[in-house]
Image (cartoon, helix red, strand yellow):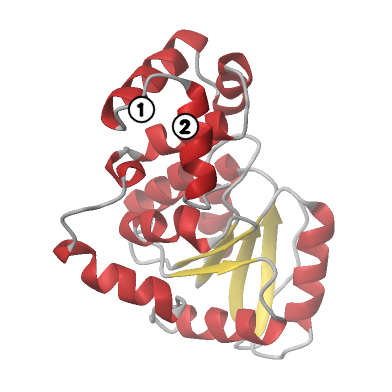
Amino acid sequence: MNQTTSPGKAIPVVVVDDHPMFRRGLKNALAETPDIAVVAEADQGHLLPGLIRRHQPRLIILDIALPDKHGLEVVKQIREEFPQLPILILSMYPEDQYAVRFFKAGVAGYLTKDSSIDLILEAVRKVAAGGKFASPRITEKLAFDFLQTDKPAHELLSDREYQVFLKIAEGKTLTEIGEELSLSVKTISTYRTRILEKMQMKKNAEIILYAIEHQLI
């Protein structure tokens, strides 16, 4: 973990991402504007609460895929401990996979890592000021979600079930999934059974085909 000090009245930001090169590039890009400063960075989710207490940031920039905790778990923990602190998701995962779930979990913004630096700066400023930031498509989906009665099958899954669903769709074994999520193979097997029941499927091949057809992987 590295850290820098925020000058003047710049927006203090903490970045949590497990890719050192990406963190460095993002920090350098943000350093070029006088009103935003990265005050701390980390590569694991469990480090975030301590950094928040120490540096009192106005915004968290968070990746989804972390080595110790999934981004949804980190978001829920931060929402409980620091309910007023806004979180901006900056992820390699496309919006269709996770954006709606993360907004419902309490984040204030969602961007993909291939977004332009100008768009990222816009999102940081808006979210730090108390606003929300999402693409028009996701905003519309959130606005009308409560009216939708024929939701896709994958939206019936819990957050943890959805995590397991995506990993199965990527072709990973139950053992591999268990290791990545720090859960037993038995627990992962139970989640798989629930997923198949909820989605009215019988085997992994159907999960993979569904994920491909719905552009989730």
Residue 119 percent coordinates (x, y): 62, 84
Q: Is residue 112 visible?
A: yes
Image side of residue 88 versus residue 180, left or right:
left
Residue depicted at 63% across the width and 20% down the height: 176
Task: Give whichever of 130, 196 is nearer the camera.
Answer: 196
User: Which corner quadrant of the image does residue 47 belong to?
Assistant: top right
Residue contact between numbered discs 2 and 1, judged by CB atoms under 8 Å:
yes
Residue 32 percent coordinates (x, y): 79, 86
Residue depicted at 36% across the width and 42% down the height: 154
Image side of residue 102 versus residue 205, left or right:
left
Residue 106 percent coordinates (x, y): 34, 60
Asked if residue 52 is positioned above or below residue 108 in the image, the reply reads: above
- The type of residue carrying mark 1 is Ile
Under circle 1, the secondary element is helix
Residue picked out by circle 2: 207
Point out the frontmost of discs 2 and 1: 2
Task: Rate crowding at label 2 as few (under 14), some (14 to 19) or many (20 or more) other CA atoms within 10 Å.
Answer: many
Task: Give whichever of 61, 54 is nearer the camera.
Answer: 61
Residue picked out by circle 1: 195
Q: Is residue 7 visible?
A: no
Residue depicted at 43% across the width and 68% down the height: 86
- Tally of numbered tags: 2
Asked if residue 83 is positioned above or below residue 158 in the image, the reply reads: below
Asked if residue 33 is positioned above or below residue 170 in the image, the reply reads: below
User: Which corner quadrant of the image does residue 84 belong to?
Assistant: bottom left
Asked if residue 201 is positioned above or below residue 160 in the image, the reply reads: above
Q: Looking at the image, tell me whether mark 2 or mark 1 is earlier in sequence order.
A: 1
- The type of residue carrying mark 2 is Ile
Image side of residue 143 versus residue 181, left or right:
left
Under circle 2, the secondary element is helix
User: Which corner quadrant of the image does residue 123 belong to?
Assistant: bottom right
Q: CA distance from mark 2 to mark 1?
A: 9 Å
